[in-house]
Image (tube, rainbow, N blue to C red):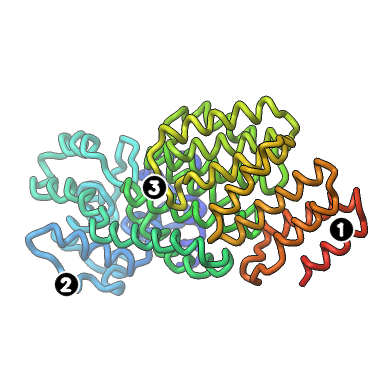
Amino acid sequence: MTPHARARIAARLRREAEEGRWPRAHLVQQIHEQARTPTVLMAWRLAMGWSQLDLAREIRQASETTDKPCSPGPSPHQISRWESSGGTVSPYYRMLLASAYGVTPGHLGANVSGFHPLTTPEGDDVHRRQFLTAAATTAAVVPLTDIRQILDAPLRRMLPASDLQHWSEVVDKHVTSYATTGPAHLIEALTPDLAEVSQLANRYPHQRDLQVITSRLCGLTGALHTDLDSSIEAQGWLRTAAGYARLADDAVMRTWLAMAGAMDAYYSHRPAETIRISTQAQESIGEAGGCALAQLLGLQARAHAIEGDRDAATEALHAARRVHEGAPVDDSFFGFPEKQLVAYSASVLSHTGDPAAWDVQEQAIELHHDAPVDQAVLRLERADFQLLAGDVDASAQTATQAVQGLAASERIPLLLDQAYAYASRLEELSPEAASDYRSHLQQ
């Protein structure tokens, strides 16, 4: 069988193993049988999804926890000889292979090509308790030094603190760029870093700090796709981010991601979905979400206002204010600063036709003086407020002011979608005013 065919079969079996939660030993056995690998040693590597070069790197890293680190270590050619039964594996390298795969040397077989499957389910690394259970039955043949090497393996599979700090700073850099960089350009800038983080997350799947970093970067990517009016892509990235937030048991990040999903639904003109996401998140997460919960409740209030349910909108907005008052101050991208709460209040009052809306709109517009896109959204909501009051000419003028003077990079798809949606509402009352307004949109 060709290497390509074996790799294809192994990839299929890895997917089946993930879906069926197979013990890793069972996956190895299936690859050995179905891909007809010359040795089970090859099946172990294919089960991990590694190339021979990947395995060589793992062996070198495993050796760093020993008294005799190997450098440069085995070549892919040497590994190929081992896996094809063309070369004998020394006890030293058998120990390192076992450490790389997270098993005892005895589980690699007496002559490498033999196979003694584990009887307990495994994760990606052997749990200390599982290993000790296995070691107790093989104590006569497993040297004590080998046992220590296996116990060291999970410790080796940890990203150093300096690297974690680096990637945290990388995410912060991209988050800071959100206010000054167009979404398409920011996605382009962060893609190489996202690719590296994805490899690290796959390599170190049990490290909480890395899970948080991955969740934040995926969450930012999802939010950028919302700005680009790419709802399907946004939802996909937010689901991935939520998965890592669950692994990290980070309630605040989970709440923020629920909020980001609710925001995507809101700006995709699905207010009922916004309300559903908000209600479901509150039931599953509770009140542990901090300022993200305040923003989620604010979005729920805006959705109720669009649906015409003034009482529910008012109640949700009051709840958002209560949570915001008790939450730590956080003016970052993942926070909910005071000026955003004011903007949400203006939105609710505008859509419910409350006379107090005008003054709150003025306050919100002033607070967002350094954010042209946010200002434009606020002015469009003021135009809707004027339209609701029957002042068509003033409404059209306000909407025109909202879009005039915006730079090309500021005319993001999300804003343009809101602007054209307003044009449709304006056209129902004044086709002529709507035509003039659209001409400004197209400039």
Foreground mark, 2 or 1? 1
Asked if residue 147 can be seen in this view, the reply is yes
Q: Observer-nearest residue: 255 or 179? A: 179
C-alpha separation, residue under disc 3 versus residue under disc 2 = 31 Å
Q: Residue at x 77, y 72 (%)?
A: 443
Q: Work out whether mark 3 precedes mark 2 in sequence or the reverse, and give the earlier one.
A: 3
Q: Decide: few, some or many residues near mark 1? Use Cα within 10 Å; few <14, some 14-19, many ≥20.
A: some
Q: Which residue lies under the disc numbered 2?
A: 71
Query: What amino acid is at disc 1?
Result: Ala
Q: Where is residue 85 in the image (x, y as percent from the top left)?
A: 29, 64
Q: Say which of 273 and 10 sits in front.
A: 273
The residue labelled by disc 1 is 434
Amino acid found under the numbered disc labelled 3: Gln
User: If you read the primary sequence from the N terminus, does the residue marked by circle 3 or circle 1 appear first?
Assistant: 3
Which residue is depicted at the point 17% across and 46% down? 151
Q: What element carries label 3?
A: helix
